[in-house]
Amino acid sequence: MKNYQPPSFLESVNENFERAAAVSGIPKGLLAQIQTCNSIYQMNFPVKIGNQYKVVTAFRVQHSHHRLPTKGGIRYSIHVNQDEVMALAALMTYKCAIVDVPFGGAKGGVKITPWKYTEEQLERITRRYTTELIRKDFIGPGIDVPAPDYGTGSREMAWILDTYQTFNGGEIDSAGCVTGKPVNQNGIRGRTEATGRGVYYGLVQLLSYADDMKEIGLKTGMAGKTLVIQGLGNVGYYTGKICQEEGDAKIIAVSEYEGAIHSPDGIDVDKLYKFRQKTGSIMGFPGTTNMKSREQALELKCDILIPAALENQITMLNAKKIKAKIIAEAANGPVSADADAYLRDKGVIIVPDMYLNAGGVTVSYFEWLKNLSHMRFGRMEKRFNQNTYTLFAEKLEAMTGKSITAKERRMLTKGADEVDLVRSGLEETMVTAYDQIREILRRKKSVTDLRTAAFLSALNKVSSDYMNKGIFP
Ligand code: NAD
């Protein structure tokens, strides 16, 4: 391992693509068209920081125009480079296809360390980046729709929206130019937690198949499963919180930038999150032991390891030490292609990123639809349903002579709110997509892992789009 250099993120994505392409039966030329990035825009712009000008390098990559708009998050990190943004944009195309979100894939990246800037400086950088996108027609509700990713959140999306609307006054659908916005600024309830909630629904579906679980020596169901989480940001925090609160899972270790903590009795992730907000670190959280390094947590014996930070966290440098039975790729590209092959051979189930973390783009799609319809989900039918269900409950009581408790009445007669509909749509999406992938894995003898099956699901859908256009008969 002395001179070992893990494959780059883009190399891993391409290697995984080619493994699936080889068994897809799709013509070579069409595969090449699907694989290539359609548009790549690198920009270097000046931003005044203090008394000086700083040149900021940034990217927007539109991987596939087979469907429009294109869609994908914006990452703020000093490690951003063109290859990384291309890899992330490609994953977005496959991700959207897998969960039947009718967009092409895209991704953006700004090469900065966000916490080194004040809020005002970040706003200036974000607004300038948006202006560059507008100048080149790289943003718009029907063109390309960004969203949050590593290092960005609803605050940045609000700045993007405001900048876009400043330049496009009167464009009626302008709110759909970006998703992941604050709820009071044309956002949607349930978007912030969406990726983590999608990870939860995906895992619940995986864990529901007794035959598949038997093969790795696990019982069905989330309850009591031991989890290790890497990264307590948006995705990691909500995944942990929802697995714990709704699935009754036990989080035995958490790894963050500053180190890792461990407790065989379980860690209350909500309290840990607040503790980190207060102290700036997860280290020393009451009832836990500090581990030697942040990497050590990944090597703990557990049922499910959830990398939710960045790419290339599990490579041949540590793959042999991984003891988890399931690796749930909440982050994009956390397992390099060579480590993936090694772990697959060892019988580890790897739930691939392009399926498992698709909850974010799914709810972004709902937000975009809400923006185009100019109306909150549930507004038309909520009261109507509530009145109908109330009448039904009263009739039931009268017919049976038995009374319904106040709690049961609340449950029975509730009309769906926006957040209820978002969660229901997300669950339906994750369950259906998992079953499609599992069906490919079961039926196709040449496919032996979930990632290749997920790729095939995506390739079948994207290639049929091209064929329907008559471009590749
Ligand atoms: P985030 O910035 O909110 O959180 C990432 C966290 O990881 C941070 O707290 C950071 O300190 C931590 N971290 C960084 N390096 C680490 C390391 N070596 N060890 C342990 N912790 C480390 O980002 P996020 O939005 O949660 O994104 C995380 C991953 O999920 C990325 O790969 C992103 O592309 C992917 N993703 C995000 C979304 C979304 O909706 N935000 C959707 C799909 C996929």
Image: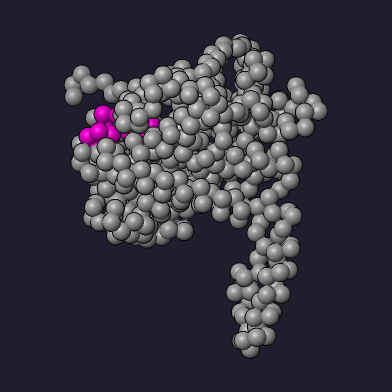
Q: Is residue 97 above or below residue 246?
A: above
Q: Main secondary structure of the magenta part?
A: helix
Quadrant for the N terminus, please. top left
The residue under the point 41% across, 54% down is: 204
Point out the residue furthest to the left here: 2
Observer-nearest of 217 and 148: 217
Q: Is residue 301 magenta?
A: no
The residue under the point 32% across, 45% down is: 443
Which span is picked out in magenta? 333-343
Point out the residue furthest to the bottom here: 401
Observer-nearest of 118 and 328: 328
Query: Can you tell which quarter of the image residue 145 is in?
Result: top right
The residue under the point 27% across, 48% down is: 325
The residue under the point 73% across, 68% down is: 387
Q: Is residue 259 visible?
A: no
The answer to whether residue 251 is left or right of residue 429 is: left
Image coords of residue 220 (percent x, y)? 33, 59
In this figure, what is the number of numbered marks? 0
Q: Is residue 136 above or below residue 288?
A: above
Q: Is residue 337 magenta?
A: yes
